[in-house]
Image (cartoon, rainbow, N blue to C red):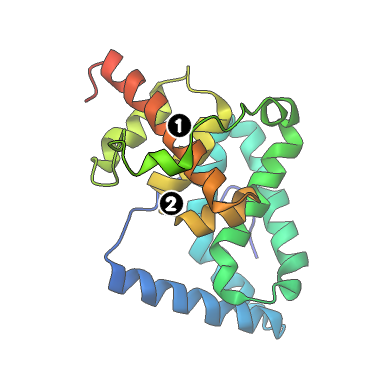
Amino acid sequence: MNLFGAGATMGVERRVPEEQNLKDRTADELLVVRCQLGEPDAFDALIERWHGALWSYIRRMTTEDEAQDLFQEVWLRVIRGIARLRDVSRFRGWLFGIARRVLMDRFRRQYLELPADDVDVAELASEPEPIGRETDVASVEAAIDTLQMLPTVERDILTLFYLHDLTLAELAEALNVPVGTVKSRLFRARRMLRAAMQERHCL
């Protein structure tokens, strides 16, 4: 089971059609159950299936040297904790939640300085989306990578939403906050990203 350096050449996970997405989630759930039953091959398959997505998320949040250590720590926590995952349908949110907690341990000050959720969720439906999911993924990816003025917390939620296609419920699981808080943070982050992209003529 090779946990070191495996993700260095892997690309970003792309959004897929809903039918394929459902098949992927079902495959994940079956793999998790097999892992919980202690099948070694299942752990290898799970790591092979998800190390690219985890690497791209962690690498986007930190330097390559730090990412290697954090990447290893995430998989160790996953292997140790997967038997305690009662609802296997929550796997994606649980997985990225572990990755985010590992990052938080390293960058605790930046996460503790998370701004207040000052967006009224009840009013979001009446406001146009700053950046919708239909926006070209490559443009968003390039913007997140190159617009270094985006704070770590905003870069975090944008990466999970756009580049790893987590749903609002999965984001809530990963961030350990209510869905309403996810909507507020995501709206603010997309508003910041749009302003930054417009300033650099990316939109």
Q: Nearer the viewer, mark 1 or mark 2?
A: 1
Most foreground residue, 176 or 147: 176
> Which residue matches tag 2?
164
What residue is at 66 percent from the left and 51 percent from the top? Answer: 176
Crowding at mark 1 (Cα within 10 Å: few <14, some 14-19, many 20+): many
Pick the quarter of the image with the C terminus. top left
Mark found first going from the N terminus, 1 or 2: 2
- Residue 11 visible somewhere in the drawing: no
Relative to 103, residue 198 above or below? above
Q: Amino acid at mark 2?
A: His
At which x and y percent is residue 165? 40, 53
Most foreground residue, 85 or 58: 85
The circle on residue 189 is: 1
Relative to 152, residue 77 above or below? below
Q: Quadrant of residue 29?
A: bottom right
Relative to 97, residue 202 above or below? above
Q: Amino acid at mark 1?
A: Ala
At which x and y percent is residue 186? 46, 39
Most foreground residue, 136 or 171: 171
What residue is at 65 percent from the left and 65 percent from the top? Answer: 1
Left or right for 178, reference 83: left
- Residue 203 visible somewhere in the drawing: yes
At which x and y percent is residue 180? 53, 48
